Each structure stands twice: as C-alpha cells, then as structure tokens.
Image (spheres, rainbow, N blue to C red):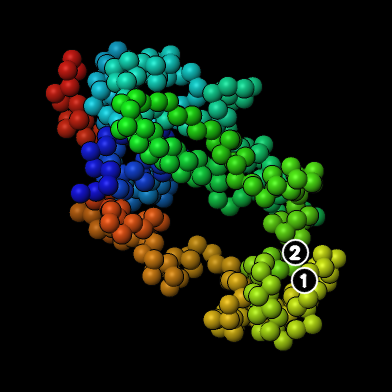
Amino acid sequence: MLALEGIRVLDMSRLLPGPYCTMLLADFGAEVIKIEEPGKGDYSRSFPPFLKNFGYWHLQLNRNKKSVTLDLKSEGGKQAFLELVKTAEVVVESYRPGVLQKLGVDYAAASKVNPKIIYCSLTGYGSKGPLAKQADHDIGYVSLAGITAMSGEAEGKPAIPGVLMADMNAALAAGMSIMIALRHAQATGEGQEIDISLYNVAMTLMPGAASLYFGSGVVAQRGNNWLTGANANYNIYETKDHRYLSVGCLEKKFWRNLCSVLEREDMVDLVDDNTKHPYLMQQLQQEFAKRTLEEWSQLLAGQDTCVTPVLDFAEAVAAEQTKANEMVLTVKDEELGEYRQLGFAMKLSKTPASLRKRAPRLGEDNEEILNGLPGVK
C-alpha cells in the first residue's frame, strides 16, 4: 500500500507550483484528479517540445494523475465539482483571489458540503494587501523579495535566477502544509484553508540576508557578503578551457585541503582576514586557469575540498551521481514510446514513490470519475 493511498486530491491548479505539489502527492499514492477547462486544460499542455502531441512540461509535472473536464462557470460544472468535493480530502487551486468565490466553488462553498476538506490556495502575493490581485511570475516575486538584487556579478546588473525559486519552493511548502492539515483533520475531523503565497515563500528563502540585516542593518547586495561573491572561498572560477569550478570551502579544513592541492599553503590563514579576499580571488583565478575542467576534476577527486565542476543540464543528467540516485527515469509507454523525466528526490525506505501512470490526456477520466455522481449528468 502506498503511503497516501485513499487520499483524493482535486487539483484546479495550472502551470508549475500547484501541479508540482500535487505530482509529489500522486507519486506517493494520492488519487489526484486534475479539474480542467473543457477544450483547453492546463496551459502547460501546449508548451513545447512535444512527444506525439504531448507537451513535455505536461508529461513531467502530471504523472500519476487523472483528468476531468468541468466548466466551472456553468451550474452543472459547479454542481459536479461540489459533489466531487464531498468525496475528497484535499483541493488545490491557483486562481487569483476572489475568482473562485465568484464561481461559488471557493473554500466557503467547499467546506459547507465537506467540513473536513483541506483547501490549499497558491497565490502570487497572498489574499490581502495592495498586490493581492496582481498577476505576476517568478521573476516578479523574487525581485520584490530581494533575491534578484543579490544575484549576479558585483559590478553588473541583477541576474535572473536560473531556477523558478518561488514557484518550486511554494510547491514544497504547499505539500508540507497539506500533510500538516491532513494530520489535523485526522485528529479532529476539521478541515481548513491554506494560503501559500509565492511572494511570502520567496521572502523566507533568505535567512542569511535576514540575519545580516536584522542583526547589523547591512543590506545583502551582489558581492558584499559571502553568499553573493565577496569571499574567495565561496565563489566561481574559470578554468583553462573556459569552463568553471565552484569553490565552497567555507570551513577551514576544506580550505586547507584546497590550498594543499594547489601547493599554496601561504594562503591558508589569509582567508581569516576579510581584507585579503580580493587578493585570494586573484590568486585562485590564476591557479585554476592553469588546468582544464577535466584535469581539475581528476586532481581534486577524493581530496575533500568542496570544489565542484559547474555542469550544464545535459552533463548533470549524465553524471554518475545522478545515475546512482536514480534521478532520471526512463518511461516506457504503449502510446508514446520511450521518454525520460526527472526521478524522485524523496527516498523513503518503507513507502517509496512510484511512477504508475503517465500524464493524462485532457478529460480522459471523465467517465470513470463523473459517472454516478448524484445529480450530475
């Protein structure tokens, strides 16, 4: 038996945060039913590249789920949804605040027909405040939260983070919140409403910047603290072949090991003096420019230095560590043939995740899910 078997989740979310959250629940056995607009569905269905009319984005984020199409603007669609709520434990949605209230399918409506329902809303800026109803994307949330200002070179413009940080972390926060609420519902019989704001989550991703500011009044900026490139022992360096190495020797023992490999014991204690870091950066760049990335990888292997090659995604997929952790799955589907997707980050010994079903076609589970619902034709 899978850990979340018997938990039914109605997923009205689209794109990334909600679908990623519900995919994690589905991976561990929850019955996740995507509630999609007839004829359109989740926007990600149309995102290239494609595999036989399936968007890879949709394939990646919606495995192990079912799909039902409902027109929530119609009375019949609303009725069908509320009938499904009676059979479910969780609802996940990502509409702007107020939209589902107008349609009559918000938490207030859902909790009337099922007081034990857990209703998780993923919003951009929360349910209140001047930006509550403003549309935005990850770049906006992380920019307003202060993350973008800390990204990039000290003398350059702010850099766009290469990962959708607010989206992905909000998905994880939503999943954890749902599990907390399920535990509460099991103990008390009470459901509850969950509000996960992508902006709020982005704010909480910076305990280092918060500690610096709240403790000393210093505002973290590009190049003015150890997390943003001020330190030689936590930085990026170019190799002879114009590739890059990341250096993360925060602890003295790792720094000492690196200096030993470089035969630069003269630098060991200089790292303790912040005024010496510009000199150390210059020296490290000169040292790393002497060899190629492959040569450094071989020389540093097993030396316990916290120095790592900067790989692109194709190289990361091919890495031996990725293979050992089974982080890329090869899916064999009768209709689509063979394709790959990311594996399961959470490894549980007794209740592991599993891939049981590819992402659904739009509305392919209508008959199974909707037939027999009271009052629904």
* 153 horizontally vs 91: left or right: right
Q: Position of residue 171 (x, y in %)?
A: 46, 41
Specify the quadrant of the image occupied by residue 276.
bottom right
Up-down: is 244 above or below 121?
A: below
Q: Can you see residue 319? A: yes
- 309 vs 367, left or right, is right
Q: Residue at x 39, y 16 (%)?
A: 108
In this view, the residue farthest toward the bottom is 263
Marks 2 and 1, Cα distance to the nearest angstrom? 8 Å
- What kind of element bears circle 2? loop
Tag 2–tag 1 contact (CB < 8 Å): yes
Q: Position of residue 232 (x, y in %)?
A: 74, 68
Q: Which amino acid type corresponds to the residue marked 2 in the rendered image?
A: Asn
Q: Is residue 62 above or below residue 330?
A: above
Q: Which residue is mark 1?
A: 271
Disc 1 on helix, strand or loop?
helix
- The answer to whether 8 is drawn above or below residue 99 in the figure is below
Name the residue nearer the viewer: 1 or 332.
1
- How far from the left and from the top, in percent, is residue 28? 30, 48
Spot occupied by residue 17 in the image (x, y as percentages of width and height):
46, 40
Residue at point 75% right, 84% down?
A: 264
Q: Can you tell which of label 2 and label 1 is closer to the viewer?
A: 1
Packing grade of label 1 (10 A; few <14, some 14-19, many >=20) is: some
- Position of 219 with respect to 48 (left or right) is right
Residue sitting nearer the eye, 241 or 114: 114
- What's the amino acid at mark 1? Val
> Residue, x 54% and y 23% (percent of image)?
127
From the viewer's side, name the closer residue of 352 and 65.
352
Quarter occupied by the C terminus: top left
Point out the residue furthest to the right here: 275
Give the residue pinned by disc 2.
Answer: 231
Residue lying furthest front: 187
